[in-house]
């Protein structure tokens, strides 16, 4: 009988944040692949696009004009999924048919006036301005009496449903905790009650010791391919210090956060030499005015690409009906990401043309 090897043998791994299992089939990564592998043509985008709804000074689709903004810019989403208005509602839900009204505010965050600069291409001080904006929004929206949770996220790339190439993210603030957050909170809370410590703090200690899933580490943050990652190059960014929300971040931590965000997204772009698509988002303490010692600031990156700029992982069949499944072991993805340069491939190309080597 073979001795169990994580790179060879099918196994299941537990995700303690969501209290669920995933299936890992590392041997399948070796199967022959005769599908597409092509690169996407490099897209040329201007610094300012007069047709873009998000560019500085332009008119949006509903006729409202954007300010002539020079840094990060926030506006109320013209097609909000949630509305602020209170409604008179008679609850006649029963055990099987449950419904309740939901209130909230949706905003769009343009990262900078530059239509052609994604996060990995922005200067660190411009990324810091995005983080400052996230802090202000968390504070402002979270202080409203009907807002109990503020979800900050980015959909990048058309494959992730992003509707506009101008670099931007979104904020959905609402009265209820969305399902993923509720599940995470339940598990963080149960762990905190049992162990009197932060689940992610304790997880980080083990990751720093093992080293094999670490992608980047700096003074204040660590990026890992989590032990339970489902997407091929999924990562989890965790603060080294135990704090619950972005507003607790010090000046130094904010700078480290901006730096690690840039480095991670450069590595992602370098992986398949493409503007790497993903959905990313911050998970942090709800703003429901209750103490939340269990919450530990973290950010998820869920990228769909599997083996090239065009070949993505599908979460279909077995994943929809059984549970999430991945082919390579998370440790293999972490090694690949760790070994990638933090110099953007486009910068390298420019420098190569100018004869500067790395
Ligand atoms: P996504 O690219 O992730 O879809 O986000 C863009 C958001 O911008 C989207 O939610 C909003 C859309 O509703 N938007 C406006 O509010 N006004 C516009 O003129 C264009 C897009």
Image (spheres, rainbow, N blue to C red):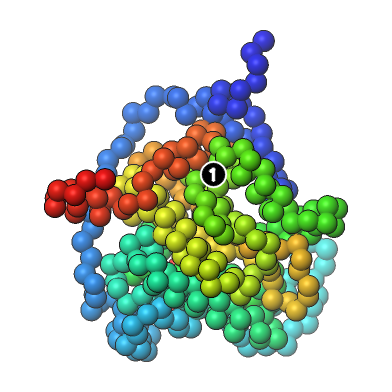
**303 vs 62: above or below:** above
Q: Nearer the viewer, residue 64 or 252?
A: 252
Q: Image quadrant for the N terminus?
A: top right
**219 vs 228: above or below:** below
Q: Is residue 241 left or right of residue 307?
A: right
Q: Residue at x 23, y 58 (%)?
A: 43
Q: Position of residue 281 (x, y in %)?
A: 54, 62
Q: Nearer the viewer, residue 173 or 270?
A: 270
Q: Residue at x 65, y 21 (%)?
A: 4
Residue 66 visible within the image: yes
Quadrant hosting residue 325 = top right
Q: Image quadrant for the C terminus?
A: top left
Q: Position of residue 111 (x, y in %)?
A: 40, 73
Q: Residue at x 50, y 34 (%)?
A: 332
User: Secondary structure under badge 1?
Assistant: strand
Q: Is residue 226 left or right of residue 181?
A: left
The single residue placed furthest to the left in the displayed view is 354
Q: Residue at x 30, y 37 (%)?
A: 37
Quadrant hosting residue 182 = bottom right
Q: Nearer the viewer, residue 134 or 205?
A: 205
Q: Is residue 213 left or right of residue 274?
A: right
**168 vs 266: above or below:** below
Q: Position of residue 91 (x, y in %)?
A: 79, 78
Q: Is the CB–ligand 1 distance for label 1 below 8 Å?
A: no
Label 1 CA crowd tier, 10 Å (few <14, some 14–19, many 20+): many
Residue named by callout 1: 214
Q: Is residue 163 left or right of residue 38?
A: right
Q: Position of residue 353 (x, y in %)?
A: 14, 50
Residue 322 visible within the image: no
């Amino acid at each position: 009988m073979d001795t169990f090897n994580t790179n060879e043998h099918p196994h299941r791994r537990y995700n303690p944040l969501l209290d669920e299992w995933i299936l890992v089939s590392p041997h399948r990564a070796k199967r022959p692949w005769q599908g597409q592998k092509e690169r996407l043509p490099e897209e040329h985008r201007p610094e300012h696009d007069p047709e873009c709804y998000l560019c500085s000074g332009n008119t949006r689709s509903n006729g409202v004009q954007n300010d002539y903004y020079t840094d990060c810019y926030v506006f109320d989403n013209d097609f909000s999924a949630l509305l602020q208005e209170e409604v008179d509602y008679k609850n006649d839900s029963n055990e099987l048919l449950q419904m309740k009204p939901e209130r909230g505010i949706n905003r769009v965050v343009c990262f900078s006036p530059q239509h052609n600069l994604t996060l990995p291409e922005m200067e660190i001080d411009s990324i810091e301005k995005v983080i400052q904006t996230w802090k202000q929004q968390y504070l402002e929206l979270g202080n409203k009496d009907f807002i109990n949770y503020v979800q900050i996220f980015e959909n990048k790339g058309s494959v992730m449903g992003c509707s506009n190439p101008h670099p931007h993210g979104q904020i959905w603030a609402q009265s209820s905790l969305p399902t993923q957050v509720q599940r995470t909170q339940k598990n963080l809370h149960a762990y905190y009650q049992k162990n009197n410590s932060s689940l992610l703090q304790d997880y980080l200690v083990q990751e720093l010791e093992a080293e094999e899933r670490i992608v980047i580490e700096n003074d204040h943050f660590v990026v890992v391919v989590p032990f339970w990652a489902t997407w091929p190059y999924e990562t989890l960014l965790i603060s080294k210090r135990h704090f619950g929300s972005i507003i607790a971040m010090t000046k130094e931590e904010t700078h480290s956060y901006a730096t690690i965000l840039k480095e991670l997204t450069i590595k992602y772009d370098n992986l398949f030499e493409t503007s790497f698509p993903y959905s990313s988002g911050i998970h942090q303490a709800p703003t429901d005015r209750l103490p939340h010692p269990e919450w530990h600031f973290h950010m998820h990156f869920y990228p769909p690409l599997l083996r090239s700029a065009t070949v993505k992982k599908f979460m279909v069949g077995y994943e929809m009906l059984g549970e999430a499944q991945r082919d390579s072991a998370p440790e293999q993805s972490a090694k690949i990401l760790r070994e990638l340069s933090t110099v953007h491939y486009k910068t390298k190309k420019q420098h190569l043309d100018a004869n500067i080597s790395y």
